[in-house]
Image: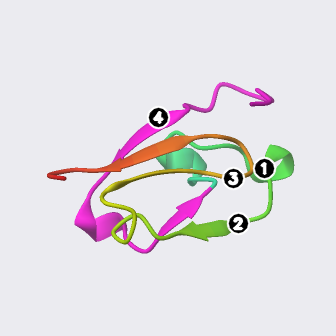
């Protein structure tokens, strides 16, 4: 995983944050727009509540899963 800034690589996501996409907004610990990869939507519910981004490897977990 390329670390262009201090973005986290693990996130716990609530139902209110769905649909899930990566990169997360800077206000939620994600990357600044200039250093981010293309936005990709991640089907976290269909994957059992945990998924990783295919671009950067960031891991996501749905709270309560």
Mark 1 residue crowding within 10 angstroms, few (<14) / some (14–19) / many (20+): some
Indicate the position of residue 51 as horizontal and vertical percent values. 47, 52
Judge depth for marks 1 and 3 and give the one in front: 3
Q: Nearer the viewer, residue 36 or 43?
A: 43
Exactly how many numbered labels are in the figure? 4
Mark 4 residue crowding within 10 angstroms, few (<14) / some (14–19) / many (20+): few
SS class of the residue under badge 1? loop
What colour scheme was applied to this rendering of the protein?
rainbow
SS class of the residue under badge 3? loop
Dots 2 and 4: beta carbons under 8 Å? no
Indicate the position of residue 24 as horizontal and vertical percent values. 56, 53
Q: Earlier in the sequence, mark 2 or mark 3?
A: 2
Q: Which residue is mark 1?
A: 36
- Rounded to the nearest whole Å, what is the CA distance between mark 2 and mark 3? 11 Å
**Residue at 58% across, 40% down:** 58
Give the numbered dot on residue 1.
Answer: none
Horizontal side of 48 relative to 7 (left or right) equals: left
Q: Earlier in the sequence, mark 3 or mark 4?
A: 4
Dots 2 and 1: beta carbons under 8 Å? yes
Judge depth for marks 3 and 4 and give the one in front: 3
Judge depth for marks 2 and 3 and give the one in front: 3
Q: Which residue is mark 4?
A: 10
Magenta-tinted stretch: 1-22
Q: Which residue is mark 2?
A: 39
Give the answer, above or below, for where 11 lies relative to 45.
Answer: above
Indicate the position of residue 53 as horizontal and vertical percent values. 62, 51
Dots 3 and 4: beta carbons under 8 Å? no
Give the answer, above or below, for where 32 lies relative to 18.
Answer: above
Image quadrant assignment for residue 41: bottom right
Judge depth for marks 4 and 1 and give the one in front: 4
Q: Earlier in the sequence, mark 1 or mark 3?
A: 1
Horizontal side of 47 relative to 58 (left or right) equals: left
């Amino acid at each position: 995983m390329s670390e262009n800034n201090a973005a986290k690589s693990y996130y716990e996501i609530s139902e209110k944050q769905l649909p899930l996409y990566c990169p997360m907004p800077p206000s939620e610990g994600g990357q600044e727009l200039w250093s981010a990869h293309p936005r990709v939507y991640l089907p976290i519910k269909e994957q059992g509540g945990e998924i990783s981004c295919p671009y950067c490897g960031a891991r996501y977990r749905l709270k309560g899963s």
